[in-house]
Image (cartoon, helix red, strand yellow):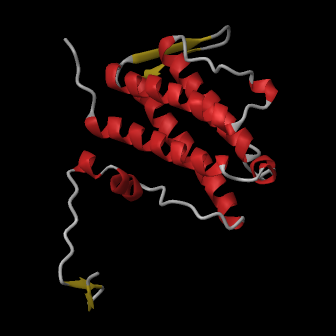
């Protein structure tokens, strides 16, 4: 028996990947001083935070499959954001495939000399989304303090980028009522 992936979960993973890709693209245009600056109370600099995010995603894939894509660079060699973006694409493809082929209720088993832990794969899926949101928020908050103009990173911004995925259709009316006031539409 084959199971169909839950479409909202798949779309949520795509959203997570889209935001990371958008943010990486913005950061690749920034001065090295901004990318390397330590951000207090976070995973470190922008570079360190992206490295943390990508290594965690590879770790999540490893927990499910026992393997994960490997980067074509050495983490200790201070990879560029462009190198990380290429690796992020590889991880994104693997994670999207995972969420589409591994039923969320499949068991994941981990153990070491001291403990054994069983849980459903959806815990990994949820962790990936939550973890990404948390650390991208750190980066975006810091960039905001640096005056960097940022895109709308929420699901509405994602919907605007991919309206076909939501059967979204915006029709402007001649008069729009907003908060009890009538305004002329554009």
In-image side of 1 versus 140 (left or right): left
Give coordinates of residue 158: x percent, y percent: 39, 52
Any part of residue 52 in sight: no
In this rendering, the count of numbered labels is 0
Residue found farthest to the front: 29
Q: Position of residue 90 (x, y in %)?
A: 52, 25
Question: Which image quarter is the C terminus in?
Answer: bottom left
- Residue 88 image-quadrant placement: top right
Quarter of image, res 49:
top right
Q: Residue at x 59, y 27 (%)?
A: 87
Instruction: Using residue 36 as the reference point, say whether residue 125 is left or right of it.
Output: left
Does 90 sit above or below residue 168? Answer: above
Which residue is most to the bottom?
181
Looking at the image, can residue 62 be seen? yes
| Residue at horizontal 59 percent and vertical 64 percent from the top | 149
Q: Which residue lies at the image location 22% right of the left edge and 65% below the top edge?
A: 170
The residue at 65%/39% (across/down) is 50
Asked which quadrant contains residue 177, the reply is bottom left
Which residue of the protein is positioned furthest toward the top in this rendering? 113
* Residue 119: x %, y % from top left: 45, 22
Q: Nearer the viewer, residue 130 or 67?
A: 67
Is 55 located above or below residue 111 in the figure?
Answer: below
Q: Quadrant of the N terminus?
A: top left
């Amino acid at each position: 028996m084959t199971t169909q992936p839950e479409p909202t979960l798949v779309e949520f993973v795509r959203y997570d990947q889209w935001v990371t890709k958008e943010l990486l693209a913005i950061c690749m245009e920034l001065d090295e001083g901004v990318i390397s600056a330590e951000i207090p109370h976070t995973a470190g600099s922008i570079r360190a935070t992206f490295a943390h995010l990508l290594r965690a995603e590879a770790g999540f894939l490893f927990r499910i499959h026992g393997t994960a894509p490997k980067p074509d660079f050495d983490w200790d060699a201070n990879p560029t954001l462009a190198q990380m973006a290429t690796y992020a694409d590889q991880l994104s493809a693997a994670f999207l495939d995972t969420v589409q082929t591994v039923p969320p209720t499949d068991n994941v088993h981990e153990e070491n000399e001291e403990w054994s832990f069983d849980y459903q794969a959806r815990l990994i899926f949820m962790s990936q989304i939550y973890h990404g949101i948390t650390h991208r928020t750190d980066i975006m908050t810091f960039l905001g303090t640096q005056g960097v103009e940022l895109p709308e990173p929420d699901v509405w911004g994602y919907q605007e980028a991919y309206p076909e995925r939501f059967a979204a259709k915006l029709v402007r009316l001649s008069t729009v009522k907003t908060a009890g006031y009538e305004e002329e539409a554009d």
